[in-house]
């Protein structure tokens, strides 16, 4: 007896084959349209079907409810932002978390004062050349982020599937790609699936060189603005009990693991019992934080770093430009410089200078680099052990 496994909420548009064998209709509990609508193509091979990550707010109709047994096991918790009743993203934050609202607005103003920022959301239309460039940029950001952490990315494990399907889904209006630009350079992304009036945040990342600018929080804020402007009632952050989800979200729900198999099938029953209870136990352990502790122990046993690799350590020190001696202006070429773009961006963050108004110098007699803006001049002091 064959088995079909699908992660329903993220594979809804991608794996229509096995889904169409079991489900005739799927819609949100308060949705206006069917997310899928299949004619009866019930499977004659009588497979065992496994659908993980099925939100409990979906309304589902099954083709052969008489001939198949359904088993359902609760798993992880999902988090979401319900937008009905709020007039704007700012209004939502005012009611949800005033302190975070102030922090996010401050971060957004600082980002926009330091760089020439543009926000763009691709939905219903994206050129293939833009798609290829942006998705490769997003992939490279994910690689760098997990390299910094010394961890493996689950997103990269499914990247080929996402890349192969998302171009058509964006142009069909079933997915969207939100991009933050510094001039023409993409510095943050959020790839999302669109389910009726629900936006599901699936993959996001940002340029580590802009790490101080709270890009992740700004992206969520801008997506809420887009949702409200376009009649969406929910922005969904999916599974994972992360702190930022808890203070952003005003509602939670349960994911379930569904199994369907022919009636009286002992093999189907045993498979559902084993896999279903395994999912339920893993969800319980995740809720208790056991997985985090286990992963920490595994990394320690493998000799992997316990903290992110943040690169050379440095700090800025105010300088009197009249006492620096002769200064040589340096062209900003990061392949030649002994530090990354992050150093200059951190200077912009600290001084609130604009990137167009900062010049890099080298002081030969002091043997260090100096950043000079319109308002502040600072030298870069590196940790001697990391030079």
Image (spheres, rainbow, N blue to C red):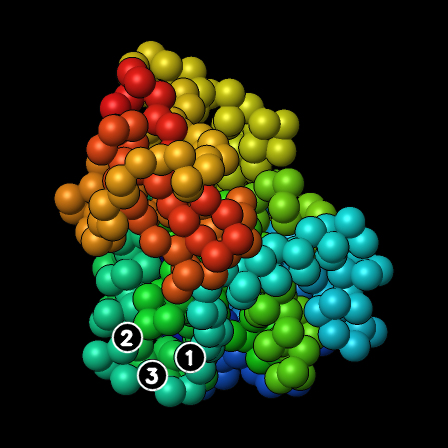
Residue 71 position in % (x across, y down): 56, 51
Residue 260 position in % (x across, y down): 48, 57
For residue 133, above or below residue 155: below
| Whether label 3 touches label 1, CB < 8 Å | yes
The residue sitting at 58% across, 69% down in the picture is 223
Q: Mark yes or no: residue 215 visible.
A: no
Residue 37 position in % (x across, y down): 49, 83
| Residue tagged 2 | 131
Disc 2 element: helix
The residue sitting at 23% across, 49% down in the picture is 330
Q: In this view of the protein, which residue sits in the foreground, 312 or 355?
A: 355
| Residue tagged 1 | 122
For residue 234, above or below residue 25: above
* Mark 3 surroundings: few (<14), some (14-19) or many (≥20) residues within 10 A: some
The quarter of the displayed image where residue 20 is located: bottom left
- Which residue of the protein is positioned furthest toward the top in this rendering? 301
Between marks 2 and 3, how big is the CA–CA gap?
Answer: 6 Å
**Which of the image's four quarters has the C terminus?**
top left
Q: In this view of the protein, which residue sits in the foreground, 261 or 257?
A: 257
Q: In this view of the protein, which residue sits in the foreground, 220 or 55?
A: 220
| Residue tagged 3 | 126
| Whether label 2 touches label 3, CB < 8 Å | yes
Among numbered discs 2 and 3, the one appearing first in the sequence: 3
In the rendered structure, the answer to whether residue 31 lies left or right of residue 4 reads right
* Mark 1 surroundings: few (<14), some (14-19) or many (≥20) residues within 10 A: some
The residue sitting at 40% across, 34% down in the picture is 323
For residue 362, above or below residue 309: below
| Whether label 2 touches label 1, CB < 8 Å | yes
* Mark 2 surroundings: few (<14), some (14-19) or many (≥20) residues within 10 A: some
For residue 8, above or below residue 225: above
């Amino acid at each position: 007896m064959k088995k079909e496994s699908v992660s329903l909420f993220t594979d809804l548009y991608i794996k229509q084959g096995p889904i169409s064998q079991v489900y005739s209709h799927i819609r949100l509990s308060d949705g206006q349209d069917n997310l899928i609508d299949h004619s009866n193509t019930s499977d004659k091979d009588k497979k065992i079907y496994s659908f993980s990550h099925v939100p409990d707010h979906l309304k589902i109709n099954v083709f052969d409810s008489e001939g198949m047994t359904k088993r359902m096991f609760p798993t992880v918790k999902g988090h979401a932002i319900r937008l009905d009743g709020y007039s704007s993203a700012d209004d939502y934050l005012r009611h949800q978390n005033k302190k975070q609202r102030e922090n996010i607005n401050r971060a957004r103003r600082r980002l926009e004062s330091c760089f020439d920022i543009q926000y763009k959301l691709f939905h219903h239309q994206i050129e293939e050349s833009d798609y290829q460039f942006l998705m490769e940029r997003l992939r490279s950001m994910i690689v760098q982020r997990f390299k910094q952490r010394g961890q493996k990315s689950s997103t990269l494990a499914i990247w080929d599937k996402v890349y192969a399907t998302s171009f058509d889904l964006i142009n069909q209006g079933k997915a969207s790609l939100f991009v933050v630009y510094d001039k023409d350079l993409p510095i943050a992304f959020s790839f999302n699936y669109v389910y009726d009036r629900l936006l599901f945040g699936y993959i996001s990342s940002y340029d580590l060189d802009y790490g101080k600018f709270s890009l992740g929080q700004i992206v969520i804020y801008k997506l809420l603005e887009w949702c409200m402007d376009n009649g969406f009632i929910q922005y969904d952050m999916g599974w994972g009990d992360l702190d930022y989800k808890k203070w952003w979200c005003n509602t939670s729900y349960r994911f379930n693991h569904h199994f369907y198999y022919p009636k009286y099938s002992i093999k189907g029953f045993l498979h559902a019992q084993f896999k279903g209870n395994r999912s339920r136990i893993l969800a319980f352990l995740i809720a208790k934080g056991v997985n985090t502790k286990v992963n920490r122990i595994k990394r320690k046993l493998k000799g992997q770093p316990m903290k992110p690799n943040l690169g050379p350590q440095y700090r800025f020190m105010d300088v009197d430009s009249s006492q620096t001696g002769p200064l040589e202006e340096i062209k900003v070429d990061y392949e030649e410089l002994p530090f990354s773009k992050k150093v200059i961006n951190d200077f912009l963050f600290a001084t609130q200078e604009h990137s167009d108004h900062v010049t890099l110098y080298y002081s030969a007699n002091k043997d260090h680099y100096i950043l000079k803006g319109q308002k502040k001049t600072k030298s870069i002091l590196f940790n001697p052990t990391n030079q």
